[in-house]
């Protein structure tokens, strides 16, 4: 007769997708740890929780492949249980249950209490801000809101994350204090849309007030803004950025396109003239600001003329940072009713052309940094280099500063003044001064 195993479960959390998913995984792990569960992030474990992404085709494919991989491990007896959570399972739960039935249970994006229950844990309401961070100890993501009210035609996020819901300022300050007490020095503010922050709770856009409150937190030295929406941008944020040294002169503002025809079809609520003026206002208010944006090429109906307009504009605007994606035709979005009429190879050619322009701009801007000294935070050591960032660079997506570890020593997690001695398209090289 087989007796029940008394071995202790180790829960392995696997995170796919964006920084908002990283944050959700950290909250899940904090809850599990508070329930005295053994938990790890992307290591070995006999119980696996996969936090999926369902945003665009590539991300969905990666999520499905990861689920299938762990299901195979389960069938081979290497893993006891597989649970799936996050955006893909919020969006496609009935399909997934049918296609991959060997998963123990599927949970959506707001199902944390039920997921914990399945893992033999209780949801603890009192754990505001308790997380097991998975990033290097010097920085952490701070999710200030969930969901999105914007009607963008190409985007499936409202289907997966629901309506915009801001987290109260006092809760975010408490969370920031706990992170600072654990050695975090840089907060990266994330949401589907930062600029909408506070409208639901305070009946006004309240990002500037939140930034002022977070800047008071002792131990936090940098606060960085990610995912600001251009329409209705609260201009008082620029004053806080200019006057408060802790707010990095940096903003991530996904603009997606610039041709008026495409912006209208995308339901972005803006025009080329308005967007260009907004960016000029940014640069007038905070001349040092590094602006990061993302663009989509190959959207339904994008003509050669629309694309030429975009190319010309990218050359003129000289963004400090830019990423470019090919359009993904997503069911249940408004744009799904349109014909996905730009061939895949043309989409890819257009994305490559934009990135070629950007890499030249990035090289030119980086050459201007040679000989200058920047305050950098040191994230990690890789091979023979310590790797840091300036305030104008976010982790994983922007420039890195490489310091030769065979000649110099800098402490990981600390701020150090680095003189830039050389530069390439996307890397800076320097030495401590």
Image: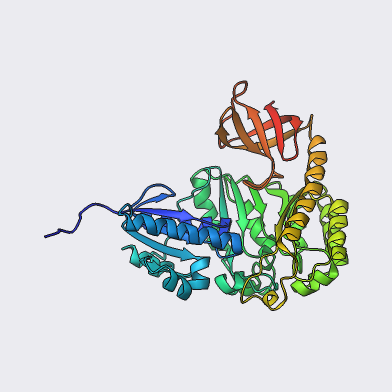
Asked where in the image residue 372 lies, by quadrant, the reply is top right
Residue 26 can be seen, yes or no: no
Q: Residue furthest top?
A: 407
x and y percentages locating residue 235 in the rendered image? 78, 62
Name the quadrant of the N terminus.
bottom left
Q: Residue at x 56, y 59 (%)?
A: 20
Asked where in the image residue 427 lies, by quadrant, the reply is top right
In this rendering, position of residue 259 left or right of residue 39 = right
Considering only vertical position in the picture, is 366 above or below 186? above
Considering only vertical position in the picture, is 423 above or below 276? above
Asked where in the image residue 258 lies, by quadrant, the reply is bottom right
In this view, the residue in front, 43 or 284, is 43
In this view, the residue in front, 256 or 246, is 256
Q: Residue at x 44, y 70 (%)?
A: 99
Considering only vertical position in the picture, is 327 above or below 9? below
x and y percentages locating residue 165 in the rendered image? 58, 71
In this rendering, position of residue 70 left or right of residue 393 = left
x and y percentages locating residue 274 in the rendered image? 85, 66
**Colour mode?**
rainbow
Q: Residue at x 79, y 47 (%)?
A: 356
x and y percentages locating residue 404 in the rendered image? 63, 26
Residue 276 can be seen, yes or no: yes
């Amino acid at each position: 007769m087989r007796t029940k195993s008394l071995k202790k479960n180790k829960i392995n959390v696997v995170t796919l997708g964006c920084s908002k998913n990283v944050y959700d995984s950290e909250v899940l792990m904090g809850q599990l740890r508070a329930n005295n569960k053994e938990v790890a992030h992307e290591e070995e474990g006999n119980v696996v929780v996969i936090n999926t992404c369902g945003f665009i085709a590539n991300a969905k494919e990666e999520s499905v492949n990861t689920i299938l991989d762990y299901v195979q491990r389960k069938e081979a007896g290497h893993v006891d249980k597989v649970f799936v959570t996050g955006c893909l399972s919020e969006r496609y739960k009935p399909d997934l249950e049918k296609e991959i039935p060997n998963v123990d249970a599927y949970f959506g994006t707001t199902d944390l209490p039920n997921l914990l229950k399945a893992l033999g844990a209780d949801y603890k309401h009192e754990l505001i801000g308790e997380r097991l961070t998975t990033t290097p100890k010097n920085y952490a993501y701070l999710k200030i809101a969930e969901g999105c009210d914007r009607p963008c035609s190409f985007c499936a996020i409202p289907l997966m994350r629901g309506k915009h819901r801001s987290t109260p300022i006092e809760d975010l300050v408490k969370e920031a204090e706990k992170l600072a007490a654990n050695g975090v020095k840089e907060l990266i503010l994330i949401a589907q849309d930062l600029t909408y922050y506070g409208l639901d709770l305070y009946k006004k856009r309240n990002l500037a007030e939140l930034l002022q409150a977070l800047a008071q937190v002792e131990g936090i030295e940098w606060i960085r803004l990610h995912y600001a929406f251009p329409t209705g941008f609260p201009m008082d944020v620029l004053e806080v950025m200019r006057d408060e040294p802790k707010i990095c002169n940096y903003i991530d503002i996904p603009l997606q396109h610039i041709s008026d025809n495409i912006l209208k079809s995308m339901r972005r609520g803006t025009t080329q003239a308005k967007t260009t003026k907004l960016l000029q206002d940014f640069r007038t208010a905070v001349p040092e600001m590094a602006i990061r944006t993302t663009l989509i090429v190959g959207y339904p109906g994008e003509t050669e003329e629309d694309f030429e307009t975009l190319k010309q504009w990218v050359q003129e605007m000289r963004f400090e940072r830019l990423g470019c994606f090919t359009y993904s035709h997503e069911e249940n979005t408004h744009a799904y009713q349109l014909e996905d009429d730009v061939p895949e190879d043309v989409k890819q050619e257009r994305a490559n052309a934009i990135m070629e322009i950007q890499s030249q701009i990035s090289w030119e801007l980086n050459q201007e940094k040679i000989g200058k000294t920047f305050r950098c935070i040191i994230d990690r050591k890789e091979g023979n280099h310590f790797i840091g960032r300036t305030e104008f660079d976010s982790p994983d997506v922007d420039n890195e500063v490489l310091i030769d570890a065979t000649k110099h020593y800098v402490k990981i997690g600390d701020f150090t003044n680095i003189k830039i001695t050389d530069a390439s398209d996307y890397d800076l090289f320097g030495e401590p001064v």
